[in-house]
């Protein structure tokens, strides 16, 4: 019997070693793939960022003229941040940007694991996370989403520890306005000092951008930042209620002022739900709920903005909602809305019983997540704690290959 147990132990150890090797190989292939892709593909959004940095450096128009045949829609502060990268050749700048994006994604995953209270394999989480469509789409476009995710999650981790926070959230809001919802979260959870710190950081970054580019700043804050006509609202990638209604009603002209009640209602309910989770000491759930709420209240929530699936999945796994977590991972890995008619196809517009739910799958998943977290709030009464022997069994499969 002893020899059988010893043999089983040896087999288990050998299996773990093989899993570690395979995991390392998969992660290495993913990283090499990112590097090879970056060196050979001209990511559109990064090229626009790069040209935006050039516009600030050269003193040319940032918002009056298109860059790479597209309007620049980000803040002047974002353009100012790209001034150093604009001084570099495009390919080198893009490589540095993508490597930095990878680094901050690893940081965001590590911080999310800390917030979960468990010790799953960081390699496994990063390798699995890179297969999620919002994450790899961020690399495909050369987007900024992973920096925003890392800044906010790291700042909220400080809040969870009772340490001074807010600077990261303020900087993220100055880069792209949607993170401002986390400032509201700080207010409703009575982290008033942190909220004012975040607002101050946002103001400081905005003033700095005004000093660097006063004309662009005036144009942006007085006219551009609320102008949704500069982007393709009905495009299938816009997985917000506003985008869905534009597709259903066949155009922005049909979506009137009545629409404002929808994001207002979602915002109030979502923030109230996040505040209740925070009151129970579960800041990871509060972060995930707030991140998803921000996507649902924004008029533009491109598919690559949905990187908030990472903390949402962490919450679902921690809560032992394995079936829901598996379904969510599959949905966000496959991104089936891209399989539906789009790019102006007639079936993109109006309601079609088999097509419309798939075409708006991220949006529906976000609404389901908020409803599920509301139900979960009634079921679980205490914040999660690691078991006496370490990590929860929910994460054991990932811990063994760490």
Image: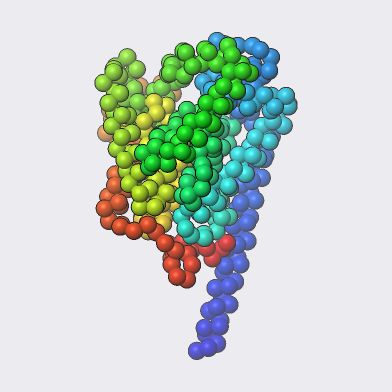
Q: Position of residue 315 (x, y in %)?
A: 41, 51
At 32% from the left and 29% from the top, the residue drawn is: 263
At 52% from the left and 59% from the top, the residue drawn is: 120
At 52% from the left and 63% from the top, the residue drawn is: 399
Compared to 113, does 1 lie above or below?
below
Q: Position of residue 172 (x, y in %)?
A: 52, 33
Q: Position of residue 371 (x, y in %)?
A: 29, 44
Residue 248 quadrant = top left
On-image quarter of the C terminus: bottom right
Q: Position of residue 335 (x, y in %)?
A: 44, 39
Compared to 36, does 225 lie above or below?
above
Residue at the limit of the structure toward the front, as seen here: 193
Q: For this view, does 168 lie left or right of residue 236?
A: right
At 39% from the left and 23% from the top, the residue drawn is: 234
Residue 77 quadrant = top right
Q: Which color mode does the image show?
A: rainbow
Q: For this view, does 35 lie left or right of residue 360?
A: right
Q: Is residue 67 visible?
A: no
Query: How many numbered circles are shown?
Result: 0
Q: Is residue 7 visible?
A: yes
Q: For this view, does 335 lie left or right of residue 171?
A: left
């Amino acid at each position: 019997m002893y020899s059988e147990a010893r043999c089983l132990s040896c087999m288990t150890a050998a299996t773990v070693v093989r899993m570690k090797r395979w995991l390392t190989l998969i992660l290495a292939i993913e990283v090499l793939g990112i590097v090879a892709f970056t060196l050979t593909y001209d990511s559109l959004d990064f090229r626009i960022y790069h040209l935006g940095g050039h516009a600030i450096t050269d003193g040319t128009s940032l918002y009056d003229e298109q860059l790479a045949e597209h309007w620049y829609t980000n803040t002047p502060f974002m353009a100012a941040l790209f001034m150093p990268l604009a001084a570099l050749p495009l390919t080198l700048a893009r490589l540095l940007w993508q490597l930095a994006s990878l680094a901050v994604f690893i940081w965001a995953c590590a911080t999310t694991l800390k917030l979960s209270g468990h010790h799953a394999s960081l390699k496994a989480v990063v390798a699995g996370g890179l297969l999620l469509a919002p994450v790899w789409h961020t690399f495909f476009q050369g987007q900024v989403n992973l920096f925003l995710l890392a800044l906010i999650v790291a700042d909220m981790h400080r809040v969870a520890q009772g340490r001074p926070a807010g600077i990261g959230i303020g900087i993220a809001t100055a880069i792209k306005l949607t993170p401002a919802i986390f400032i509201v979260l700080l207010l409703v959870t009575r982290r008033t000092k942190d909220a004012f710190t975040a607002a101050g950081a946002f103001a400081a970054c905005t003033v700095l951008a005004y000093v660097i580019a006063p004309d662009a700043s005036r144009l942006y804050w007085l006219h551009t930042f609320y102008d949704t006509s500069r982007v393709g609202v009905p495009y299938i990638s816009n997985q917000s209620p506003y985008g869905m209604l534009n597709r259903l009603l066949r155009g922005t002209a049909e979506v009137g002022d009545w629409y404002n009640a929808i994001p207002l209602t979602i915002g109030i309910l979502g923030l109230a739900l996040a505040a209740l989770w925070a009151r129970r000491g579960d800041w990871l759930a509060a972060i995930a709920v707030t991140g998803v709420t921000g996507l649902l209240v924004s008029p533009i929530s491109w598919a690559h903005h949905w990187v908030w699936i990472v903390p949402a999945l962490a919450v679902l796994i921690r809560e032992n909602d394995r079936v829901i977590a598996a379904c969510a991972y599959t949905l966000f890995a496959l991104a089936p809305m891209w399989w539906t008619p789009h790019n102006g196809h007639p079936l993109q517009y109006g309601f079609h019983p088999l097509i419309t739910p798939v075409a708006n799958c991220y949006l529906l998943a976000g609404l389901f997540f908020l409803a599920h977290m509301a139900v979960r709030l009634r079921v679980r009464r205490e914040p999660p704690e690691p078991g006496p022997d370490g990590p929860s069994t929910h994460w054991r499969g990932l811990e063994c290959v760490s």
